[in-house]
Image (cartoon, rainbow, N blue to C red):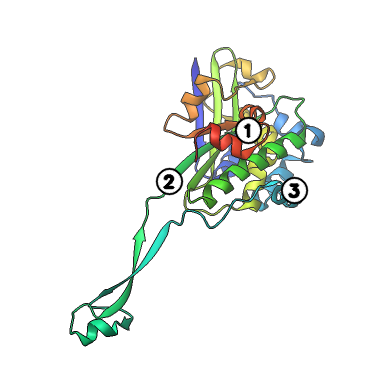
Amino acid sequence: MNIVHEHFKNLHELMTTLEKRPNNSIMEYKYASIEESASFTGTQSYKEAEQLMAHGYTKILPEIKKGMVQANASTSPMQRRRVTTGVQGYAPHVPNAIQGLPNSMIRTESQMQKVKTVSIVYAMAGMANVPLSEFIKCGIVVLSIVNKLELSGCRVALQVAFKHSKVENEIAIATVNVKSYSEHLDLQKLSFPIAHTSMFRRFGFKWLETSPDITDRGHASGYGRTIHSDSKQLRNAIASNGEILIDALIIQKNKYDADAIIKSLELN
């Protein structure tokens, strides 16, 4: 089984790459990324999807914020401060100074603590009959998981596998970084790649249409069959370096409960 996996450093690289590439020989006359309807993709055009990618899917921000379960932000500080004495500081320590001790100044020391990190890959997908609302519902759960982990003191990196499908002799996978460990959770930026069906049904299709590496002509028939998280092939392809794989199957099995998913994947 041949595996084609292309990874993009960020959303900008993804958009500019797809914009420049022509259709490959396998998908030469296939343009589902442009021709599919708004009822299926959630956007009137590929151009509109690009605008949402660039500026955020602001229409659903209230729904995302409402759906996200907030954790206690006061837990697990990443850095602690300790007041001590020394030869230099910001104020005199009077008792030590009177005794003529060298450590007669008060200073503050920062004690860095080890910070847990988690790298998550969200494999976004849905069969043709999956409604737009399901993408939003699953996206909210993913954002809730990231939010809860970060508020507990864990730093999270997030990728989206916006295309992962299988034909007889080949698996095609496209992933993109959407959040680094150092970035804060930006709901406006992440709302589109995490919760909008056009990320999968326009950009995912566009990637398959233009990927120079696919070789199996089966892709042209229905754009391949979605692979789920219980597939060892998918896990080995995109989560072989310790990443945590999450998809709709895992979300649905845990009844859209972010806490249950965190527990089941042993993320806490």
Q: Position of residue 73 (x, y in %)?
A: 56, 56
Secondary element under disc 1, as helix, strand or loop, is loop
Question: Which disc is residue 124 wearing?
Answer: 1
Q: Quadrant of residue 219?
A: top right
Question: Which disc is residue 116 wearing?
Answer: 2
Q: Position of residue 120 (x, y in %)?
A: 52, 38
Q: Residues within 10 Å of mark 3 (few under 14, many from 20)?
A: few
Q: Residues within 10 Å of mark 2 (few under 14, many from 20)?
A: some
Residue farthest top in this picture? 168
Q: Position of residue 36 (x, y in %)?
A: 77, 31
Q: Earlier in the sequence, mark 2 or mark 1?
A: 2
- Between tags 2 and 1, which lies in front? 2
Q: Is residue 209 left or right of residue 106?
A: right
Q: Residues within 10 Å of mark 1 (few under 14, many from 20)?
A: many
Q: In this picture, is 111 found above or below 143?
A: below
Q: Are marks 2 and 3 in contact (CB under 8 Å)?
A: no
Q: Looking at the picture, which amino acid does disc 2 mark? A: Lys
Q: In this picture, is 185 found above or below 203?
A: below
Q: Earlier in the sequence, mark 2 or mark 3?
A: 3
- Residue in front for this viewpoint, 130 or 72: 72
Q: Position of residue 47 (x, y in %)?
A: 72, 44
> Cα distance, mark 2 to mark 3?
29 Å
Residue located beneath label 3 in the image: 63
Secondary element under disc 2, as helix, strand or loop, is loop
Q: Looking at the picture, which amino acid does disc 1 mark? A: Met
Q: Is residue 35 left or right of residue 145?
A: right
Q: Looking at the picture, which amino acid does disc 3 mark? A: Glu
